[in-house]
Amino acid sequence: MHRLVASLPLALLLAACSPSPAPSSPDAAGQAAPANAALGSPEWYAWVDHSLRIGDDGHGPSHGSEAWNRAVQAKLGQEAPQSKPGSPEWQQSVDALLRTRLRPSS
């Protein structure tokens, strides 16, 4: 029992120093951006699709296809990345733009 009481402050200190997951902010439709989703992953594509309303209840172009990339470009308009649609650079630009653009207004 004495060991348990003596180790409690150490356990609390370690818990306080542990990194916490990054908070994600909801997009315009209320869906939170995937905090750790890899660019080009199914989760990331679903978030971009939902955020920009590309598909219609799953009845849109296949994620990552040329038609889907063109639809993303069209939805982003003048803010659309200039890099090759679908490229890693393009995905990174789309991700950064959506994470900043779709923050809820207070």
Image: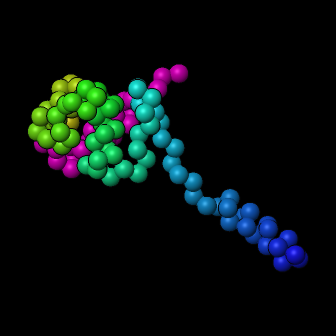
Q: Is residue 51 above or below residue 7?
A: above
33 left or right, relative to 10: left
30, 77: nearer the viewer: 30
Q: Position of residue 100 (x, y in %)?
A: 39, 34
Picture quarter containing residue 79? top left
Question: Is 89 covered by the magenta stretch?
Answer: yes
Whether residue 33 is visible to the viewer of this picture, yes or no, is yes
Name the residue at 84% across, 78% down.
3
Residue 43 in the image, given as x and y percentages of width and height: 33, 46
Frontmost residue, 101 versus 38: 38
In percent of width and height, residue 71 lies at 17, 30
Quarter of the picture holding the N terminus = bottom right
- The x and y percentages for residue 30 are 45, 29
Q: Report the span colored magenta.
A: 83-106
Which residue ends up furthest to the right in the rendered image? 2
Q: Quadrant of residue 52?
A: top left
Residue in front for this viewpoint, 57 or 99: 57
Q: Is residue 43 above or below residue 60?
A: below
**Which colour assignment does the render follow?**
rainbow
Q: Residue at x 18, y 26 (%)?
A: 74
Left or right relative to 100: residue 21 = right
